[in-house]
Amino acid sequence: MSLIWAQKSLAGLSIGQYKRCPTMTPDFPFWAGAFAAQMHRLRTTTGSGLHQFELLFGHWIGRFRLAQQDEGVHSRDRLWNLRLVFWTFLWQVAQVGSSCREAIRQAQSLCQLNGRAFPPDQSSPYCQARGKLPIERLQQIHTSLVSEAEQGVGAKELWCGHRVRAVDGTTVTMADTPDNQKAYPQLKCQKPGCGFPILRLLAFFSLATGMLTTWVTGPWLQSEAALLQALWLELRAGDVLLGDRGFSRWAVLAECVVRGIHGVFRLHGSRRCDFRRGRRLSKHQRLVRWAKPRTQAASLTPEQWARLPEYLDLRLVRCRMALPGFRTREVILVTTLLDNLKYPAQALGKLYLRRWDMELTLRHLKTTLQMEHLSCKNPDNIERELRMHLLVHNLGRRLMLEAARRARVPLDRVSFAGALAWARRYGEALLQARHQRKRRQLIQELYRVLASDLVPDRPARRQPRAIKRRPKPFALLTKHRSRFLEVPHKSHYWERRRFKKCAQKSSR
């Protein structure tokens, strides 16, 4: 009881304040130092100082989210407790290319600095603890972060008073293990041992906050339209769903109409577009009616297909792209927004141009954060690694959003790679700050630097889809590595093959 009373009475004092306290030190002259060390151990075990990123992002992630569980895997305060594992894993993902050994060294140095027992040198305990991170906790952290950012969205950040969600998908590869191959099989045209498991990711992107609000994963053989069925509940009536031509299907548009969601998509190339038919609104706008197809969509069940209407009233809009460097000069959009006065064609064209922000977000994930290839060995850990990559992205976007709001600069001009780089440097400075006032000054300076270091606005810059760096002269792995024989003099073989192709082209 005396220890509990002492903890409650000294919870608000630091170690230096406890040693200088004149009313407490004389009462315990012999074991005051040992008691102070014990209090220091108790405070650093549950305190906020396990990692430099916690000082920077901790106020957006509630402390109770990382508290030890009442029962189960993380109910005991081990060397690799829940809080230490989470922030170390987050640091490892943010430090692109860092290994588990480097992350362990970082955790050991910080634990030694805080005066607590540091974890062992082996990577196996850290990987096991990382594989026991509760996925429901990670989902709660993501949900609270996104909802907190959405609460500060003003009317100027909305599009015509609507919340916009851009949808797009991508694929990532992972370690070639039997468990991963079973959950996410590789391409059927590839021989066993020559390919990698492929995961398909479909996500919603908020144009107002720049965050990935929700996502769903599946094998490569599952289409994006089928994965979209799991995300309809994340949208509410009045939202605008923005997508490319892959989502301009009759079933997707019908789902938008039934659920009260507004869809804006690029017209699919296989659908014939005749502006001589339908009700004329202007030279480049028509109101058309699409009938329900005879064949059922593969992504819907018979019950879902039966409740869709027989006809859809839609609007076709032809938008002219007069931007230098753009490959596309004309875009035809199909939308459920029928009012051409409230939603003019020019506003729809500018909205579709902002869909490119989703492409840049996927590039940041796969290139800047190197999420293109995941390294975990089983599907459960693959999901944890994927969630941590998305969490690092959203935390970086939250920094950018806060800096843009304070300085009143466009959010799309703030650099994502620069935000991660400055977060690492200022996180180290925050770890060395001695008092709270200095930490607030450093955070204010971080926001100022992010808002001042803007990405140059290059509206007419041409960016062709080509690579400058030449590939290495290595042969392709067409057999299992145990039966593959390396080609002798592969460099000469590569040069001869290139020369042969050039000669064939010139002869034609």
Image (cartoon, grey):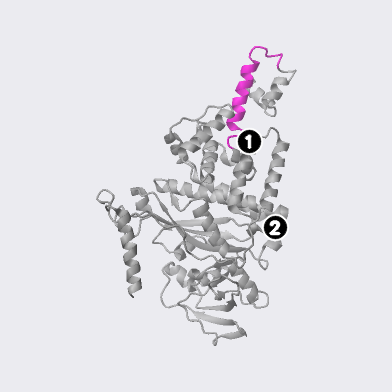
Asked if the stretch drawn in magenta spans residue 471, the answer is no
Return the x and y of residue 442 as percentages of the image width and height.
69, 41
Please tell me which residue lies in front, 422 or 16: 422
Point out which mark residue 337 bears.
none
Which quarter of the rendering shows the N terminus? Answer: top right
Relative placement, left or right, of 223 versus 389 is left
Which quarter of the rendering shows the C terminus? Answer: bottom left
Do the residues bearing badges 1 and 2 touch, measured as CB atoms within 8 Å? Answer: no
Can residue 427 be seen at all in this image of the molecule?
Answer: yes
Residue at the image point whose x is 66% and y is 53% from the top: 453
Which residue corresponds to mark 2?
409
Does residue 50 sit above or below 498 in this rendering? above
Residue at the image point whose x is 67% and y is 28% from the top: 11
Return the x and y of residue 13 as percentages of the image width and height.
70, 27
Please tell me which residue lies in front, 481 or 251: 481
Please tell me which residue lies in front, 333 or 472: 472
Q: Residues within 10 Å of mark 1 (few under 14, many from 20)?
A: some
Return the x and y of residue 187 as percentages of the image width and height.
35, 59
Residue at the image point whose x is 52% and y is 84% from the top: 274
Q: Residue furthest right?
A: 22
Asked if the stretch drawn in magenta spans residue 50, the answer is yes
Does residue 274 sit above or below 17 in this rendering? below
Mark toward the start of the polypeptide (1 vs 2): 2
Relative placement, left or right, of 441 versus 352 is right
Residue at the image point whose x is 46% and y is 30% from the top: 120
Q: Which residues are magenta?
A: 25-51
Does residue 391 sit above or below 87 in this rendering? below
Does residue 50 sit above or below 495 in this rendering? above
Q: Residues within 10 Å of mark 2 (few under 14, many from 20)?
A: some
Point out which mark residue 431 bears.
1
